[in-house]
Amino acid sequence: MQKYVHCALLSILLSPLAWAGSLVIRHVTVIDATGKPAQPGMTVIIERDQIVAIGPWRKVKTPAGSQIIDGRGKFLIPGLWDMHVHGFSTEPGSTVEGETWMYPLHLANGVVGVRAMFGPEDARAWRMQHAKYGKPSPNVYLASPIIDGPNPTWPGSVAVTDAAQARAAVDRYQANGADFIKVYDGVPRDAYFAIVDEAHKLGISFVGHVPDAIRVEEASDAGQKSIEHLTGVAVGASSEEETLFALKWAQTGDFLRRDLRAEATYDESRAAALFARFIKNGTWQCPTLVVNRSYEHFDDGIFMHKEWLRYIPSDTRDLWKKMGDDTGKQRNAQYWSDAHRQFPEELNLVGRMYRAGVAILAGTDTYNPYVFPGFSLHEELSLLVEAGLPPMAALQAATVGPARFMGQAERRGTVEVGKVADLVLLDRDPLADIHNTTSIRAVILGGKWMPRASLDAMLAEAEATAAKPPSNSPGSTTN
């Protein structure tokens, strides 16, 4: 009987709390992410899934029968988005290690939207299955499967060797309902431009790495909507771009040596022209600083966050350890010294682009080794601030920026009347210190209230799930 009561209570805590009337948050400081200063002493009224009123509490009439939340001393921000994640290509609920173990970790950390960068074969079928999940989930925007060259880096990628195969891949995944096309390092030059042409014809965007055969300025001019992990940017800003591009070090896996040389030959005028090109072409950057830092510190593990490992299934933990161990065996002390020097240069590059006006997206590349669903987005925000973004700009990189990027700006991304009520209530001010985005008191998902107790129950369920013996693994991680 006691076990039954406990399970029933857990089920209640894990469900968003629906309310027949309006949800009203009084006396709260609103940080709407539009760029306006914080607005203290506001009342926010939510009906169903929508924000219907915002104003000083004396001027906003509270509907009868409302659920009242006291927001004194608290801060209301838009729900956060992680714009580079993995693990959303398996069938929901199919295995313990499938994607559903990530949902509570994202939501408990205020992440209400994700851009899944290695999508399923059939996005429409995935969405139909996902609709049956029955528990809270972030909003998911799906890539195609990764489109790579003749020898793909990652299992499950689509190999294209020529223009005809590239066009066929774009046709297939646009027809199957992908939100966008994802390209990778090995795509041949003619195949890349066939992807560009076909994507433009079909009205679907394409994003991803800048392939080895393509210069970063060419990718921008071609209309690649986002560049992940800063691929090609340092080379494009180098006075030695011609030499570095021709060496094709990326094909041998020696990214580090190439990029260190590129950063040592950073040219202000070339960089200014490149960044202006990004702005003109609407090319967004998703630098994924947190995963770069993880890979560049496999040797010392100082960013391993052992306190979060209890939420990660054992087979994923084992995979992460193996990847770190294998990388360590392949690299010498000089490599790790260079790797540690590399990360500050990446921070500098992001800061330079921001100051030039290049649009930045916050993304983590979870679930690569020691990049944790939900938790690591807050790390990414702090790294963006370390790179030189003001806290408001970092917050916008995870809220209004993603909404604009995904064509959702009319509905999501800010705390404004008429927007979907995907919100996070914080105990502390994120504009005073970006680390305060972790002080989550409640999450509102589609107008449904999830207080701290519900979020803690989600984490408890995730920990219990992670403790179960592994079944079939969904596959390897990927950038």
Image (cartoon, rainbow, N blue to C red):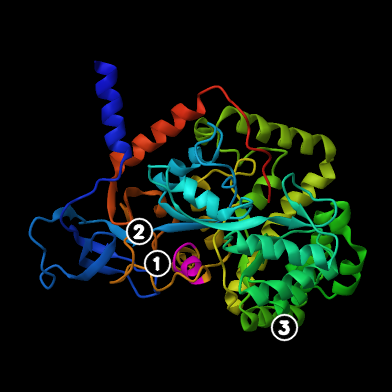
Q: What amino acid does circle 3 point to?
A: Ala
Q: Nearer the viewer, residue 278 or 125?
A: 125
- The residue where tag 1 is placed is 412
Write down the residue under mark 3.
273
> Can residue 374 be seen in the rendering of this structure?
no
State which quarter of the image contains the N terminus: top left
The answer to the question of whether label 2 and label 1 lie on touching residues, with beta carbons closer than 8 A, is yes
Q: Which residues are magenta?
A: 398-404
Which amino acid, by three-letter code, is at mark 2?
Asp
**What's the residue at 75%, 76% (across, down)?**
217
Observer-side mark, 3 or 1, equals 1
Q: Quadrant of residue 44?
A: bottom left
Tell me the crowding category of disc 1: few under 14, some 14 to 19, or many 20 or more residues within 10 angstroms, Cα based. Answer: many
Q: Position of residue 425 (x, y in %)?
A: 31, 54
Up/down of 18 relative to 191, above or below: above
Residue lying at 18% horizontally and 53% vertically, measured from the top left = 69
Q: Quadrant of residue 264?
A: bottom right
Residue 304 is inside the magenta segment: no
Q: Earlier in the sequence, mark 2 or mark 1?
A: 1
First in sequence: mark 2 or mark 3? 3
Q: Is residue 248 left or right of residue 140?
A: right
Crowding around mark 2 (Cα neighbors within 10 Å: few <14, some 14 to 19, many 20+) is many
Q: What secondary structure is found at the residue carrying circle 2?
A: loop
Q: Nearer the viewer, residue 362 or 39?
A: 362
Marks 3 and 1 sit apart, C-alpha to C-alpha, by 32 Å
The answer for how far apart the CA atoms under marks 2 and 1 are is 8 Å
Q: Residues within 10 Å of mark 3 (few under 14, many from 20)?
A: some
Disc on res. 422: 2
Measuring from the top left, give residue 155's x and y in whole percent. Answer: 74, 44
> What amino acid does circle 1 point to?
Arg
Residue 251 placed where, x, y %?
87, 56
